[in-house]
Amino acid sequence: MLVEGPVEVVQEDGTIARSDRPVVALCTCRRSLIFPWCDTSHRGRKRPKAPPPASERRTD
């Protein structure tokens, strides 16, 4: 999620993360190593492939 800065994020433990950048990327998937900021860690993981709908499944 892109947010116009400056930004202050209050984390669950009460600490405040600050950024003075004009635009910051916030992590919404919680995979980032620098949470709450996005480090694009989500790109390295693929979502599991969903099974086909029941109407398309083979019934041999």
Image: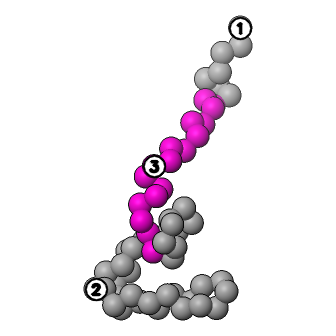
What SS does tag 1 mark? loop
Can you tell which of label 1 and label 2 is closer to the viewer?
A: 2
Where is residue 21? Give x, y as percent. 31, 85
Outermost residue on the top side: it is: 60
Query: What are the residue bounds of the magenta stretch?
Result: 37-53
Q: Are marks 3 and 2 in contact (CB under 8 Å)?
A: no
Which is more N-terminal, label 2 or label 3?
2
Circle 1 Cα neighbour tier, 10 Å, few/some/many (<14 / 14–19 / ≥20): few
Please, what is the three-letter code of the amino acid marked with disc 2?
Answer: Pro
Q: CA distance from mark 3 to mark 2?
A: 26 Å
Q: Residue at x 57, y 36 (%)?
A: 49
**Residue where numbered disc 1 is placed:** 60
Amino acid type at image mark 3: Gly
- Three-letter code, disc 1: Asp
Residue 50 drawn in magenta: yes
Residue 29 appears in the picture as rendered? no
Residue visible at 46% across and 58% down in the picture: 41
Name the dominant secondary structure of the magenta segment: loop
Q: For the residue carrying disc 3, how many other residues have a C-alpha within 10 Å: few (<14), some (14-19), or many (20+)?
A: few
- Mark toward the start of the polypeptide (1 vs 3): 3
Q: Under tag 3, what secondary structure?
A: helix
Distance between mark 1 and mark 2 Cα atoms: 58 Å
Give the x, y percent position of residue 55.
65, 25
- In the picture, the disc for residue 22 is 2
Residue under label 3: 44
